[in-house]
Amino acid sequence: MTDTVKLPTIRLHAGRQKRVQHGHPWIYSNEVQMDQPAKAVPPGSAVRLVDAGGTPLGIATFNPHTLIAARLLTPDAGAVIDSAWLAERLARAVKLRERLFDRPFYRVVHAEADGLPGLIVDRYGDVVTVQANSVFMDRRIDDILAALDAVIAPRAVILRNDSTQRALEGLAEETRLAKGELDGPLRLEENGNAFFCDPLGGQKTGWFYDQRDNRAYIAALCQGARVIDFFSYNGGFAVTCATRGAASVVAVDRSQPALDNATRAAEANGVAGIFEARRAEAFQELERLANAGETFDVVIVDPPAFVKSKKDLAVGCRAYRKMTRLAARITAPGGFLLAASCSHNVDPPTFAEQVARGLVDAKRTGRILRSSGAGADHPVHPHLPESAYLKAITLQLD
C-alpha cells in the first residue's frame, strides 16, 4: 500500500507545471528540481508531485535516471496507490473492452491511455500476457497478478518483459510463465476467425491485435483476388483475406514457427486449399517477384519496426520507401496495396511521404482509400498523439 502522507515529494521548476495541469501525463527530467533528495528517491517509487510553490499536482511514478522522470498516475493527490487501486483501473479497462468486443480476445491495458503508464496486458481468453515497461510496474508484478486474478481470473499468465523500453528504465529482459501452464500454441479469435500464437516464444506479446480493423478492411476488397501478405507472422492478414473470398493467398515470413501457426489457422478456418505459407526474407522475395514480373491483386506489407530509435529515422525511412516501391511493382493495375508501419518514431506525415516516394520510384500512380491506425483496444491518450504508433495506408494503384 502507498500512504500518500509518506510519499516522497517531487517539486517542479517554476512555470513547468502547466503541461501537467492541462492533462499531459509525462514530466521530463529537466522540469524537475533534481536536487539531492530527488536524486535519492529509489527508481520506481510513487511520489507526490507538486509545483514550485508546493501546490499538489497529483501522484506519479518516478525514476530520477530517465528522460521521462515522472508519469502521472492520478491528479488526486489523496489517492492510495495499492492493489485495490490497480484492480479498479484494470476493471475499468476490461469494462471498456467488453463494450467493444463480444469475445475475450483483445488488448486489456494500453499503458497511459488506460491510466496505467508502463503496463501492457493482452488477453487470449483465459490466458493473459503482461509487459511491465517501467520500474514502477515491474516492482508491482505481484499486485498486478493479484488484480488480474480479481478481475479476470486467468488460468495462465505470461510475463513478456523483453521489450527494448525496459532497457531505458534500467530493467533486465525476461520472458517467463508466472502462473499456470501452457500446452502448445494458444488459440484466439479475431474477426470471426480462429488463429494461433505463441505468447512465450513469439514476437512481442504473441499476437498483434492492433491490426484487427485493418485486416477486416483489406479483406473486404479480396473477393476473387490473388493476395500476398509479407511479414505475415501468424497469418492475421493472410488468413482473414482467405476467409473473405480470396482466390489464393500467399503468406510470406522468415519464421517457420509463425508460418506453422498461420497454416494451422488456414486449416482451422477451412481455407487451406487456397493458402500457401512461403518461408522467405520479405525484401528478397519482393525483389524476386518484381524482377520476375509477377503481380497480385492485393499486396500487404506489414513489417516490424524499422525505426526503433530516432537515430534510425533516416535509414528506416529509406526502408519504408524501398518496401513501397517493391510492393507497388508487384501490385496489378487496379489492385490494392496496404502498407503499414508500427514505428512510433515515424509520424504519420513522414510515413505517408515515404509511401508516396515509393510509388514514384515504382512509376505507379493511384489513390489513398484509407489512412488508419490501431483498433479501439489500443486507445491513444489525448495528450500523447505520439503514442498513436500504428499507421496503415490502403491504396488502389493504376
Image (tube, rainbow, N blue to C red):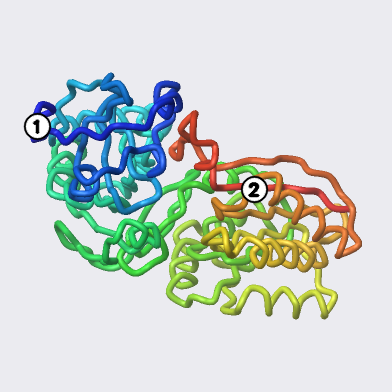
State whether residue 75 appears in this view: no
Residue at 25% across, 58% down? 159
User: Which label is found at residue 75?
Assistant: none
88 vs 246, nearest the viewer: 88
Label 1 element class? helix
| Residue receiving disc 1 | 6
State whether residue 347 appears in this view: yes
- Residue 47 vertical position relative to residue 244 in the rendered view, above or below: above
Residue at 35% across, 52% down? 66
Q: Position of residue 358 (x, y in %)?
A: 80, 60
- Disc 2 residue type? Ala
- Residue 284 vertical position relative to residue 341 in the rendered view, above or below: below
- Residue 302 vertical position relative to residue 119 in the rendered view, above or below: below
3 vs 374, nearest the viewer: 3
- Residue 353 vertical position relative to residue 23 in the rendered view, above or below: below
Residue at 20% across, 35% down? 86
Label 2 element class? strand
Q: Earlier in the sequence, mark 1 or mark 2?
A: 1
Please state if 233 lies on the left or on the right of 154 as rendered: right
Q: Position of residue 280 (x, y in %)?
A: 60, 79
> In this rendering, which labeled residue sits more in front, label 1 or label 2?
1
Dot 2 crowding, Cα within 10 Å, few <14, some 14–19, many 20+: many
Please state if 290 lies on the left or on the right of 340 as rendered: right
| Residue receiving disc 2 | 392
- Disc 1 residue type? Lys
Q: Quadrant of residue 114?
A: top left
Q: Position of residue 94 (x, y in %)?
A: 30, 33
